[in-house]
Amino acid sequence: LKNQRIVEPHLKALYSDFPYVLAFQIVSVPGKISSAYPDSYKNSIGLDISDQIHVKALFNGEQYYISKVFKTVQGFYAVVMQYPIMKNKKIVGAIVALMDIGKIMPEILSVKPENTDYRIWVMQKNGYILYSENEANVGAQLFTSEIENQFPEILKFGKRMQAEEWGVGSF
């Protein structure tokens, strides 16, 4: 896991296949980044991320994990998908895909915003805005931001969506 010459070609191949992924990393026991691609993420090698929820889940035996939005050690908000690396039936690390919310949401939405007359936004249950056509809103916390003061109807809609799996509304 720590040999860059062996690991990097695999990370590079993954990176070229998934344009919405910012970086691929290898996290080793006990939770340190041991490899990273592309080069702009190499400064994260050696950082201890063992306190992050997805890493804790990995070392508690979760086989596959998609995180909620969190603040990365690099200082921005993202989600990760990780898959464990096993040796002798033990988890020894994980391949981690660090994803940009603004890039991945348009890829997974069944309706493409540019093909509609309406605006689309995606919110986590806690009110964190994952995606909005207005990029200034991405990363905002609906229930504690200026958005709620400017648009009380959005706050009302957000609270309704908190209680439901999904929804459509207008304001």
Image (cartoon, grey):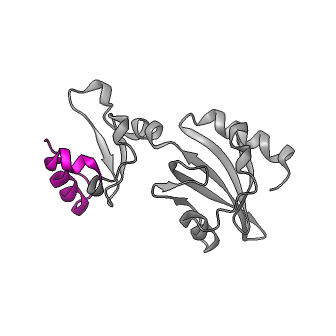
- Closer to the camera, 136 or 36? 136
**Which residue does the image show at 69% across and 62% down from the upper left?**
48
Image quadrant containing the N terminus = bottom right
- Residue 168 sits inside the magenta stretch: yes
| Percent of width and height locating residue 151 | 17, 45
**Which residue does the image show at 63% across and 43% down from the upper left?**
23
Q: Which residues are magenta?
A: 145-171
Residue 126 lies in quadrant: bottom left
**Which residue does the image show at 53% across and 37% down from the upper left?**
20
| Percent of width and height locating residue 141 | 33, 53
> Image check: 3 left or right of 63?
right
Residue 84 lies in quadrant: bottom right
- Closer to the camera, 47 or 19? 47
- Residue 53 sits inside the magenta stretch: no
- For residue 119, above or below residue 47: above
| Percent of width and height locating residue 108 | 41, 40
- For residue 87, above or below residue 109: below
> Image check: 66 left or right of 135?
right
